[in-house]
Image (cartoon, coloured by chain):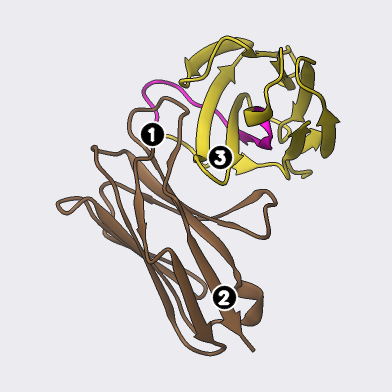
Chain colours: A yellow, B brown
Amino acid sequence: KAGVTQTPRYLIKTRGQQVTLSCSPISGHRSVSWYQQTPGQGLQFLFEYFSETQRNKGNFPGRFSGRQFSNSRSEMNVSTLELGDSALYLCASSWDRHPQLTQETQYFGPGTRLLVL
Amino acid sequence: SQQGEEDPQALSIQEGENATMNCSYKTSINNLQWYRQNSGRGLVHLILIRSNEREKHSGRLRVTLDTSKKSSSLLITASRAADTASYFCATDSGNTGKLIFGQGTTLQVKP
């Protein structure tokens, strides 16, 4: 079974631009979460989608948004890029999650490294 | 905000030695997971331990969980140079799909 894939792997943008990152979960997984990793803040949760609905959101400004498609693929968008948005963006998928079930293992993709100049 | 504090921040050992990393967290959890990351790449899932479990093994890995102390440890036995990586603990406290990560321990295994 193929793992989580993320595209593109590397991206260079300039301040003020916007960017869209893509994530394809493991086949059969319906939950997709996004994380930002920086040297200063570490790994921080952005948001989680399940069946095309955002179920949880981290403490990031509205410039960060996402969506999930019917095939569970997900995209995140960052508008009006700032230098501080330079980071490794990681996407993770898990099999299923229902409020009554214990959290399942999240499997991570290789990440998209974004550099904002 | 970080849920977990990991200790030590960096660890350097010789091949064949054991490596122990500790993680403390603040709130009640459903489970705790350990991940490995090589040189800023994606995270590789190592092991998940549920809140009602005290110890779990997977190959050369041994994880313990003490919910009364809100702490966990990861032991890697007979370490190899290929174990060189950063190790993170992550907790899920409420079936929210949100993992809260510690700052990580950077392990260097010298051949």
Region of the chain picked out in magenta, as a range? A85-102
Give the structural element (helix, strand or loop) at label 1: loop
Pointer 2 indicates a residue of which chain?
A: B
Q: Secondary structure at mark 2?
A: strand
Q: Which residue is mark 3?
A: A106
Q: Does residue A106 appear left or right of residue B20 in this picture?
A: right
Q: Nearer the viewer, residue B10 or B64?
A: B10
Q: Which of the two residues, A70 or B106, is positioned nearer the viewer here?
A: B106
- Tell me the subunit letter for badge 3: A
Q: Amino acid at mark 1?
A: Ser
Q: Is residue A11 visible?
A: yes
Residue at the spot of label 1: B1
Residue drawn 80% across and 16% down? A17
**Which residue is denoted by mark 2 in the rendering?**
B108
Residue displayed at 68% across by 28% down:
A83
**Is B91 covered by the magenta stretch?**
no
Split into 4 quadrants, where in the image is the N terminus of chain B? top left
- Residue A8 position, x and y percent, is 85, 33
